[in-house]
Image (tube, helix red, strand yellow):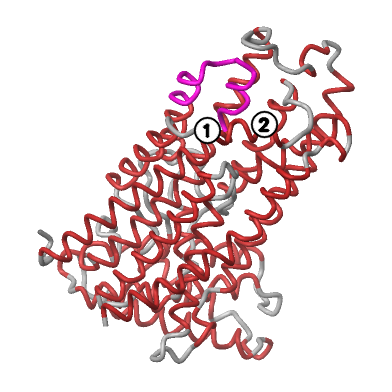
Amino acid sequence: MFGLDPTLFFLLFFCLFAACAFEFVNGFHDTANAVATVIYTHSLKPTQAVVWSGFMNFVGLLTGGVGVTMSIIGLLPTELLIDTNVYHSMAMALSLLFSAILWNLGTWYFGNPASSSHTLIGSIIGIGVGHAILPENQTNVSAVNWDKAQEIGQALLLSPLFGFALAIVLMYILKKTIKNKEIFKEPKKNSPPPLWIRAILITTCTLVSFFHGRNDGQKGIGLVMVILIAFLPGYFAINSTLDLNRLQKDLTQVEIISAKIDTTTLSVKEQESFRTVISSSKALHELLLTKNIQTSNLSTKQKFDIRKAALNINKHAKKLIESESVALSEADKKAFKKATAGDKAAFFAFGATSGTGIAAVTDFAPNWVMWMVALSLGLGTMVGWKRIVVTIGEKIGKHHLTYAQGASAELIASVTIGLATAYKWPVSTTHVLSSGIAGTMVASKGIKNLQGGTVKNIVMAWVLTLPVTIVLAAGLFVFFRWITG
């Protein structure tokens, strides 16, 4: 099938299964982020809560587009994304999957709310590091997309702090404005809260589940796309549903705006980016000269050439747009960005599985991939909730979670994750919610209300996830490259 020999076909099937397993683990690993409050406050029974949360995760993923997906893939060195050696690509896919799943399972087993986002991002950076130390690689660690890593790292760092601070503010506002103090009490054993409190808690659970699907779910899509590009480049190196002829307009726009840039004001690196944009744009123009070109008529090499040109244009155009040395009007910068990276993702992108502009060449996912990952995430959400629910409800603060604290933390989490998704930033649902709950505990009775042991475990998992997964993925990548030649 697809021209693969039986061994490669088996490995492809295994990798796709492992990617679904990662998203399944992601579902039950992060389930507590959405259902902890409604279960702990008896607003919903556990079965009702996890089934509803699983469904909303499913819907969230299907309406989320592929912006976060491509931010994740963008961390990989460009050389790995255009490597035509299927065994090299297979080593990348296997090391990525194994390192991510091993850490996720380990932290879940010990009941620590660790981050699937950190896990996957650390694994991807680890592959870049592993690639950098290979004897044949001359670029060393510069092969890693450090600019993208820094951007994502800032989002991962700032989002929990944002959630912590905003939760304190929200709890303060609630205390001053809500006269009914029932909402500030601990849940009564085996007794559901008043109807209005219950409605608030179910609503916030729904929002967190939905936005978790829109953000975390896209990471699974990114995994699957890396695997498909690795094993079946002839089918998935570029978007086969895209009308390549429409790229001519975007390429012309890039060349017109590039001509306005005064290169004498640019640094050496910026001049290099400028030359890369110009040369890649011309190369892509030449590849598309044939009238009514169709992706079905292209060879695998031509597809990789188109992919390489599109990736280089987007990567280096972004650097130019963000540089203060580039003297372009805001209108020109906006047009430049639209022609290369495309428009910002729509809030609801149901059925829209590709980007716009030149990015549409590489930023895509087939509908069947989105459905497969959505089902894996939704089903995973329906199991494995109990270990981490107890941590969220009882072990972050010295006092049990109240109705107001649960609703505030989940509302803040949903807003934070929603904003991050709109800007194509992968963030940690786990750490956003955990920090929100910690913020509500501090707002209630001060910093002394936090349980030092649990907070220490969560922070340690947050601190250790990146270095551990980087080392693990780098080691696995070098090992798999060695055994595959």
* Callout 2: SS: helix
**Any magenta on residue 221?**
no
**Any magenta on residue 49?**
yes
Circle 2 is placed at which residue position?
A: 411
Quarter of the view holding residue 425: bottom right
Between the C-alphas of marks 1 and 2, the distance is: 11 Å
Q: Is residue 244 visible?
A: no
Residue 68, compared with residue 30, is above or below; it is below
Query: Between disc 1 and disc 2, whose residue precedes?
Result: 1
Q: Say which residue appears at 46% left-offset and 34% top-offset.
A: 384
Q: Amino acid at mark 1?
A: Ser
Circle 1 is placed at which residue position?
A: 209
Residue 37 marker: none
Q: Say which residue appears at 67% left-offset and 49% top-offset.
A: 457
Quarter of the view holding residue 269: bottom right
The answer to the question of whether label 1 and label 2 lie on touching residues, with beta carbons closer than 8 A, is no
Q: From which residue to which does the magenta span run?
A: 34-52
Q: Is residue 181 left or right of residue 470?
A: right
Measured as percent of width and height from the top left, residue 63 is found at 43, 38
Q: Amino acid at mark 2?
A: Leu
Q: Residues within 10 Å of mark 1 (few under 14, many from 20)?
A: many
Measured as percent of width and height from the top left, residue 368 is found at 27, 45
